[in-house]
Image (spheres, helix red, strand yellow):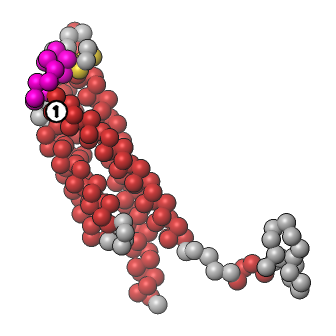
Amino acid sequence: MASRAGPRAAGTDGSDFQHRERVAMHYQMSVTLKYEIKKLIYVHLVIWLLLVAKMSVGHLRLLSHDQVAMPYQWEYPYLLSILPSLLGLLSFPRNNISYLVLSMISMGLFSIAPLIYGSMEMFPAAQQLYRHGKAYRFLFGFSAVSVMYLVLVLAVQVHAWQLYYSKKLLDSWFTSTQEKKHK
């Protein structure tokens, strides 16, 4: 076998590469999508840990309520949003379709639903801040509703991309399963 820069093997012009084996596209796609989902899970973990820290500081009263406000109601069910991510991670090693489907369903229940509820719960406070410039909850001098809406928007994007990539991964796994059945 010749190197790229070295001499070519005798008797070939280099156009005989068509017969070589290649990695099937759905396997390449699976690896890429798993990597993207893992990155999103790590971002979700950071958001989740920040939320847990905020809630702990608020409940344990480590700082005054002027510094860190008490948690909103939507933050409690959102704490369960770590479960879909763990199910997603458990589905990766053996391409477990059922774990991935459970992860996607529970993501809607434990991640997206609390975020939708949170946007509705915080809307009156956001409206009050926008119209009158008055905030009643604060996080280190910033309006709590502003900061939490930023967190909420970031979390929605992370979960939406996670669902999108999970669906594409599921399709990729179904493709490989169907090909195995046809053989």
Tell me where residue 71 appears, x and y as whole percent. 14, 30
As drawn, 40 above or below 22: above
**Residue sitting at x 41%, y 87%:** 181
**Residue sitting at x 24%, y 63%:** 102
As drawn, 163 above or below 61: below
Q: Nearer the viewer, residue 180 or 3?
A: 3
**Residue sitting at x 25%, y 18%:** 140
Tell me where residue 11 appears, x and y as whole percent. 89, 86
User: Image check: 32 left or right of 98?
Assistant: right
Tell me where residue 83 appears, x and y as whole percent. 22, 54
User: Image check: 173 left or right of 20?
Assistant: left
The image quarter in which residue 115 lies: top left
- Residue 121 visible from this viewpoint: no
Q: Nearer the viewer, residue 56 or 169?
A: 56
The image quarter in which residue 96 lies: bottom left
- Residue 73 visible from this viewpoint: yes
Tell me where residue 150 appears, x and y as whole percent. 32, 29
As drawn, 173 above or below 168: below
Question: Mostly what secondary structure, the magenta segment?
Answer: loop
As drawn, 41 above or below 34: above
The image quarter in which residue 5 lies: bottom right
* Callout 1 crowding tier (Cα within 10 Å): few <14, some 14–19, many ≥20: some
Element under disc 1: helix
User: Can residue 33 be found in the magenta stretch?
Assistant: no
User: What is the span of residues highlighted in magenta in the rendered image?
Assistant: 58-69
**Quadrant in the picture for the N terminus:** bottom right
- Look at mark 1 in the image and give the residue it sits on: 55
User: Can residue 68 be found in the magenta stretch?
Assistant: yes
**Residue sitting at x 44%, y 54%:** 36
| Residue type indicated by callout 1 | Met
